[in-house]
Image (spheres, helix red, strand yellow):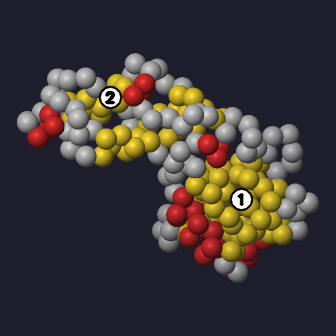
Amino acid sequence: MIQVDIPAAVRTVFGKGENRRLRMEKKTPAVVYSKGDDPVALQFDEASLYKNLLFIHGRNAVVTLDVEGDSKGKRHVLVQEMQKDPVVERLLHVDFLEIALDEPADFIVPIRFTGVAKGVDLGGELQVGLNSVTLNGCPLDIPDEIVVDITHLERNGDPVCCSDLDVPAKVSLKNDPASRCVWVI
């Protein structure tokens, strides 16, 4: 899983007008939610936050927030929701969810198929059954993606099933092992 460090500061102003002033100063308001604790209001430098979130967009990533003015200091979080202005593509607000790095959780991991199947070269059609799988494990043990080489697939031959995927040792697959990922007809 990708790891990104982002500096932040505790936000002391609240409300619609104050958040507008904050955005005019090129700051983005955000909130960190965690189990059982009160939410923590944060503010980020707009350019730095946008660049980092653009890098991890659509991928599994653990964000380490180095929070200035917070008793915890560093917090490990996942991006839960981003609100953007639809006209100017500017971040308006970000919600983060605090996680424990040593607790297993479920993550959806994309599958990337590489190569050209033999069956496709001979006139067959590639059928994709699953683009992603659900893995359970500690956040840092989860891969960013699962790469599958499909060059060996023949027309009307054996498919690549979930049981054929290369999953790290400390991670378990939540999908049915007999589920077909890709095949050629």
Looking at the image, which residue sits at the far bottom? 25
- Residue visible at 30% across and 31% down? 182
| Image quarter of residue 64 | bottom right
Disc 2 to disc 1: CB gap under 8 Å: no
Quadrant where the image shows the C terminus: top left
The residue lying at 63 percent from left, 73 percent from top is 48
- Of residues 126 and 42, which is closer to you in this image? 126
Q: Earlier in the sequence, mark 2 or mark 1?
A: 1
- Residue at the image position 75 percent from the left and 56 percent from the top: 31
Q: Position of residue 46 (x, y in %)?
A: 64, 73
Q: Is residue 62 above or below residue 116?
A: below
Q: Which residue is mark 1?
A: 64
Circle on res. 163: none
> Between residues 163 and 20, which one lies in front from this camera angle?
163
What's the amino acid at mark 2? Val
Q: Amino acid at mark 1?
A: Thr
Along the horizontal axis of the image, is 169 left or right of 124?
A: right
Q: At numbered mark 2, what does the secondary structure look like: helix, strand or loop?
A: strand
Looking at the rendered structure, the secondary structure element under dot 1 is strand
User: Gap in Å between the C-alphas at discs 2 and 1?
Assistant: 36 Å
3 shown above or below 163: below
Dot 1 surroundings within 10 Å: few (below 14), some, or many (20 or more)? some
- Name above or below for residue 67 compared with residue 97: below
Residue 81 can be seen in this image = no
Q: Nearer the viewer, residue 5 or 9?
A: 5
Give the residue at x 32% y 28%: 160
> Measured along the vertical axis of the image, is residue 50 above or below residue 113?
below
**Residue 138 visible in the picture:** yes
Q: Position of residue 104 (x, y in %)?
A: 69, 35
* Furthest residue toward right: 71
Q: Position of residue 147 (x, y in %)?
A: 40, 43
Q: Which residue is mark 2?
A: 160
